Image: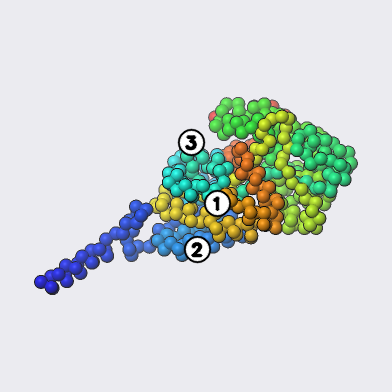
Amino acid sequence: MKKYLVLALSLGLFILMAAPMVFANGQQQSSASAPVTVKLWDIRTQQDQQMMVTATDKFNQAHPNIKVVPEWFQNNPYKDKLRIALGAGNGPDIFYNWGGGPLRSYVDAKDVVNLSPQLNADPSWKDRYAPSVWGPVTVGGNIYGVPTEGMDAELLFYNKAILSKYNLPVPSTWAELMQDVTTLHANGIIPIGLAGKSEWPEMIWVQYLTDRIGGPAVFNAIAKGETGAWSNPAIIQALQLCQDLAKAHAFEPGFASVDASTNQAEALVAGNKAAMVAQGDWVFGTFKNNFASFYDTGALGYTAIPSVGSNPYGKQAVGAPSGYYSISATTKDVNAAVEYLKQVNLNDYVVKTMLTVTGRVPPVKGIAPQLKAMKNGQFEVWLYDTITNAPEVQLYWDQYLSPTVAKQLLTNISEVFLLQETPQQFAQNMNKTLG
């Protein structure tokens, strides 16, 4: 009898060991099988990339049943590679993106996982982030990405010493800006440095002015493909104001040959040859590191792009509340990918590294005291407040639109700044891209 009992127990133990194990995520995995592999695509470089490598290694060590494998790509080639891979159904499990139009196209093609159920089921996860982050990744009321990078916004940097020398105001209205431009040009100072060869620095002016005049509804109509949306009076007025700047000699001679990647426009400000430059917040670090002798004098100022008239859109921001991670619809284990997003995205280690090493402002709640303690705390707090308090943060137009339409947009904007195309011709050309 004992012999049969021992045999039965041994057989039962063998069956138990051979049976598949069922985890809380609903996935079955043999006890002898390899961990679930999650492929991740990203474009971050240098310190930002190393930060994510370290955070991912920590996650993998703490989760033996999941192995996240990151791959790194250059920015411009990445966009086409991602589009082709997702379209072919062999994309990564998790992919970096900017939200906006390209993400919407992936959602329409059913290539992306809707994360709203997981976020709503874990309010502490969703509530970790500043509310302004969700706009670029919300499609049809559902959320298709979670923030993974620092905040960015475009603003106006200025040389305090130059404005003080000529008793000029820091421009908060368009009238003040034009007053500054007239006086500065008359005294042989370039009013505004502009990297026109790169074209997107010109878009800063067009997009902000459109938003200042007409509010977010103007571009929302364009994003929806509404017929004639580029002919909105707010866009026409914004383009006319840009041409007013050009006619008033606001920009340096030969601005169309100046490349943003070489920081020539910033060099004009740092060298006391230009008074202002409209750029992204990232050039704060450029001034600090590349033009230290200027930065150390305390002459660098910053402010929002001026308002126009009495329109109520002065607190709107243009930028990116974050970069995002989304999950591909073809991933074999959504729960494993979600677990990575929960545990790694803007976790304590990442936030601390951003604040102390990379100098980025993470879009998470409750970090104002930490920002104030930073070496550049005053600027970081200003940026954080600007983005988190904005009624809406409008994503860069050239990131929202498809690459083909974005190229046409930048080309037409360039021709407007060169006075080779009227605002009405611009609208006619861009309306052809709708529908």
Q: Of the two numbered discs 2 and 1 on the same chain, state the one appearing first in sequence.
A: 2
Judge from the rendering whether residue 52 lies leftward or rightward of residue 369; answer left or right: left
Q: Residues within 10 Å of mark 1 (few under 14, many from 20)?
A: many
Name the foreground residue: 427 vs 324.
324
Circle 3: element type:
loop
Does residue 403 lie above or below 352 as drawn? above
Q: Amino acid at mark 2?
A: Lys
Distance in Å between CA atoms under marks 2 and 1? 16 Å
Q: Of the two numbered discs 2 and 3 on the same chain, state the one appearing first in sequence.
A: 2
Report whether residue 434 is seen: no
Q: Residues within 10 Å of mark 3 (few under 14, many from 20)?
A: few
Quadrant, the C terminus: top right
Q: Amino acid at mark 3?
A: Gly
Q: Amino acid at mark 1?
A: Thr
Image x and y of residue 320, in percent:
61, 45
Circle 2: element type:
helix
Q: Based on the displayed image, in which of its 4 quarters is residue 215 positioned? A: top right
Mark number, residue 58: 2
Does residue 87 lie above or below 333 as drawn? above
Q: How is the image coloured?
A: rainbow
Q: Based on the displayed image, in which of its 4 quarters is residue 187 positioned? A: top right
Distance in Å between CA atoms under marks 2 and 3? 35 Å
- Name which residue lies at 74% across and 51% down: 263
Judge from the rendering whether residue 26 lies leftward or rightward of residue 68; answer left or right: left
Q: Which residue is mark 1?
A: 148
Mark number, residue 239: none
- Name which residue lies at 70% across and 58% down: 375
Q: Which residue is mark 3?
A: 140
